Image: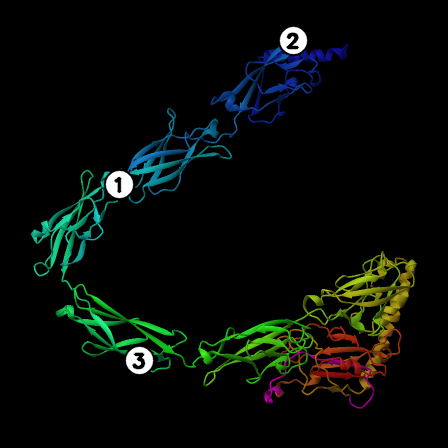
Amino acid sequence: MGVCWGPVVRVLVLQAAWALGGGQVRYSVAEEGKAGTVVGRLAHDLGVEAGEAEARGLRLVAQGRRASVEVSGASGALVVSSRLDREELCGKSAPCALRLEVLLERPLRVFHVELEVTDINDNAPLFPAARKNLSISENSPAGSRFPLEGASDADVGANAQLSYTLSPSEHFTLDLHRSEEYRESLFLVLTKALDRETLPVHRLVLTASDGGRPSLTGTMELVISVLDANDNAPQFNQSVYKVQLPENAAEGTLVVRVNATDPDEGSNCEITFALINTFPPKALNLFILKPKTGEIHLAGALDFEEVRSYEIEIEATDKGTPPLSGHCKVVVEVLDVNDNAPEVWVTSLSVPVAEDASVGTVVALLSVRDRDSGANGQVRCALWPAAPFGLVATLSGSYSLVLREALDRERVSEYEVEVRAEDGGAPALRGRLAVRVPVSDVNDNAPAFAQAVYTVLARENNAAGAELARVWARDPDEAGNGCVRYSVWEGGAGGAWAVGGWRSGAASSYVSVDAESGRVWALRALDYEEVQVVQFEVRAVDAGEPPLCGNATVQLFVVDENDNAPALLPGAGGVEGAGASGWSGPESGALWAWAAWGTPAGQVVAKIRAVDADSGYTRWLRYELWEPRGKGPFRVGLYSGEVSTARALEEADGPRQRLVIVVRDHGEPSLSATATLSVSLVEGAEAALAAAGSSWSGPGLRAAAGAEGGAGASSSWTNVWLVVAICAVSSVFVVAVVLYGAWRWAPRAGVLSGPGPATLVCASEVGSWSYSQRQSRSLCVADGAGKSDLMVFSPNLPPPPPGPAAKETQPEPPALLDTVSGPPSLASPSSPRDPFPLLALTYHPPPGQALLGAGLFPWGVRAVGAWRVPKDGNGTFASALASLPEPRAVCVGGK
C-alpha cells in the first residue's frame, strides 16, 4: 500500500501548490525560433510525469488566433510548431505575452499558460520612400531648416532606437530633436548658401541605423533642386567689339553680332538688346540693332573720306524682378577700297636644277606690277613655301628666284613654288604665280640595307643550294645610280668567318649571295656539331660614277636537329651506385654491379650515365628498363638513370640479374642507346668486402653495404661486420703506410703544358669546370718510369691577350694542380674487378681565386676528387688523350 500511495501524495502536493500559486505557468521564447525549439517542460511544470502526458491527454485548447506552439505528445514539452513573428502577433506592444489554455483530460483540468515572445533585431529601419525631392531657393540664408520624415522600425525597445547620418556635404547637415512626449523630429539644416549656377542639384543619402546588435540600416536619397534667383546681370563676351567695314559695303550688310549671357534660368536669363548712344550722333540712322539676336546691320552708305570710324553703345537687359543690365561698345572702322590686284609673270626660267647646285644659283627672273596708286599700288612679294628657294629684289618691280638651301632629289624630286604679291591697299589685294622647278639626279646616296644585322636561322643537314635568306638594299637614286648588285665581302676587319665546334674559316665556303636578287644560298650542308654560327658581310654596290656601296652583317645560326644518338659514358662515370660497379669496355656497353641479398627496396645499386651531342630539348635523356619486363627486383629512374631495388632482394632472385636499359633522347623521332647491366647478388659479408675493395676504385662509388642495417638483425651479422671493419681499418693503415713511403721516396710527377703556361679557371669567366670536345693535341711524357695514372684539366677560356702583361699574369702550373695516384695494385688493367687506374686531383687555387663547383670531365666524372681513366691495350693513355680538348695543364703522376 505504501508503494501505491507515493505518487498520489506527490500529485496532491503539486495540486495544492498550483492552487496557492494562482494556477499559471510563464514561459519566454525569442521570436523567429525554429520549429521544434523547446519552450518549456510543460508536463513537468504541471506535475505530470513525462511518460504520462500523452496518456492523460495533455494538449493545448484551440483558440481563434494561431499560437504557433504545441505540446509534444512524447515528452510533454511545449515546443515551437511554426514561425513566431513578434511584430505580427503584438505589433509595437511590449511586452508581447500570449495567453494559452492547456487541457488535461484525465482527470479533466484546465491550466493557464502565459508565453512571452521576446523581440530580436530582425527588422531594418524603413523610410516612407526611397527618394525624396526637395526644392530650395538659392537665396535661402544659412541656418534655414527643412523638415524631413524619419524612418520607422517594426522592432521594439533598443532595436527600434534610430539614429541618422547624412552623406558628406558642405551645404547641409542634420538636426534631430527627441522628446518623451512627442515623436522625434528630423530637420535638414542649410549650413552654407547655395549657388544654382555652381551646382543646380544636390544628391545626398540619409541613413537610419537602429540600436540592435548587429545594427541594421535603411537609406533614403535626398534630391535637392536649387531654385533660381535673379542674382546675375547679363555679361557680354567682349567689352569692346572692333569691326572693319569697307567703304563700299552694301546696305543690309551684317556689321557684327554682339552676344551676352546670363547664368540665371527662366525669365531671369531672357535678354533684350538696345542701342542707347552713337558717335557721331547721326550714326543712329546708319545702323540697325535687332533686340533679340543682337545683330547690327548697315542701314546706309559709308564714306571713308567723311567718317573713318563709328562708336555704338549697346545695353543688354534681362526680364528678372528687378531687371539687371550690362553694357558694351562697338567700334566700326571704315576701310579704304582697293580694287586692283597685283600682276606677276616670269621673265626667264632655267630648269631643271641639279641637286648638287650651289646655294645662290639663280633659277628664274620675275616681274611685278600694280595699276593702283599710292599705298594701294605699293606691292610686296613673298614666296611659298619659303624653302629651299627665296626671292631677291633686284630693281623696282623685278625679283630673282634663287636657291637658298641644298637640294635633295631623293627627298623632293620637283618643287612647285608660288609667288604671292600683295599691295598696300585696305583690304589688300593679292596676285599669285605658280613656278614648277624639277631637280635632276646625281649619285649621292650609297645603298642602304633594310637591317644593319640580319639574323637567319637554318636547320642543319640542309640541302646544298637551298635558299637561306634574302637581303635587300635600297638606293634612292634613279637610273644607273640606283641599280644595286650584291656580293659576299671578304675584306674588312676580320672578314667573313664561321664559328662553332673547333672549326673556323671564310664564310664564302658555306654561303653565296645572288648579285641581282640578294638571295643567300647554301653552298653545302650545314652541321650544327661542326659549326653553330656563320657570320659574314654582304656588300651592295650601285652603278653610279663613282660607285657607292653599303654593307650589312648576316648572322647565320645553325639550328640543331636530332641527328645524334645518346652515348654512354665509359669509366666510373658510366655507372655508379651502392654496390661495387664498373664498365667492361666503351664498345660493348656492358656494366656490372654488386648487391647484397636482403637489400631493402629503394636502395640505389648503380647509376647509368649518358650524353647526347645534340642541344636543347632533344638532348634531354630518359632511361627505360627494357629487360627484364614485368615485376623484376630492380627499376631505373626515368631521368636520373639510377638503378635501384624495387623490393627487397631474396635468394630466389638468383646469383645474377641481367638488366637491359634503353637510353632515349627527346627528339622527333627519338634516338636511343642500350646498356647492359649485370648485377651480382651475394651475401652481405661478400658485398661488404667487395664494397670495401671497390672504395679504392673511384669517387662516387658507394659500398652496397650501406643498407645492411635493415637486413641483418642477429648477433651473427654483427660479428661478421665487426671482423670486416677490423680488416678494413687494418688495410687502410697498411695502404696509408705504403702510400706514404711511395710518396716519400718516389720521384715527383712531371708537368706538361701546351703552347702556353697553365690557365686557371675562375668563376668570373666561365662559372664552372667544363671541358670541350672540339680540339685535340698530342702529348709526350718525359723519359723515366712508366706512369700508371694521368690527369688532364682543360678549361674553356679565351686565349690571353698578347704582350708581356699576359705572360706576367699567368700562374705557374705547379701552383694549380697536382695528382696523387692510388695503389699500383688497384690500377693494374689486368685486374678483373678493377680494370681502370685510380686518379686523384687536388686543386690549390692561387691567392684571390675561388674554388669552383665540380663539373663533368670527358669520362663523366667530377672535377674534384678521384676518377677512372681507361688505358689502351698496351697500357698507355693515348686513346684517352686523343679524345680530350687542347689541354691547358696536364699533370702526370706515378707515385
Q: CA distance from mark 2 to mark 1?
A: 85 Å
The answer to which image quadrant residue 345 occupies is bottom left
Earlier sequence position, callout 2 versus callout 1: 2
Residue type at mark 2: give it: Leu
Per the image, label 1 sits on a secondary structure element best described as loop
Q: Nearer the viewer, residue 380 or 570?
A: 380
Q: Is residue 702 visible?
A: no
Q: Is residue 336 visible?
A: yes
Residue 200 pos. (x, y %): 31, 41
Q: Residue furthest top?
A: 108
Q: Is residue 800 magenta?
A: yes
Residue 543 pos. (x, y %): 48, 82
The answer to which image quadrant residue 427 occupies is bottom left
Residue type at mark 1: give it: Glu
Residue type at mark 3: give it: Ser
Earlier sequence position, callout 3 versus callout 2: 2
Q: CA distance from mark 3 to mark 2?
A: 140 Å
Q: Nearer the viewer, residue 415 or 45?
A: 415
Residue 727 pos. (x, y %): 89, 71
Per the image, label 2 sits on a secondary structure element best described as loop
Which label lies toward us, 2 or 1?
1
Start-end of magenta stretch: 781-806
- Is 472 positioned to the left or the right of 137 in the image? right
> Label 2 belongs to which residue?
108
Which label lies toward us, 1 or 3?
3
Residue 111 pos. (x, y %): 60, 13
Q: Verify CB contact (< 8 Å) between mark 1 and mark 3.
A: no
Q: Residue furthest bottom?
A: 783
- In the depicted structure, whether residue 295 falls above or below residue 400: above
> Label 3 belongs to which residue?
350
> Label 1 belongs to which residue?
265
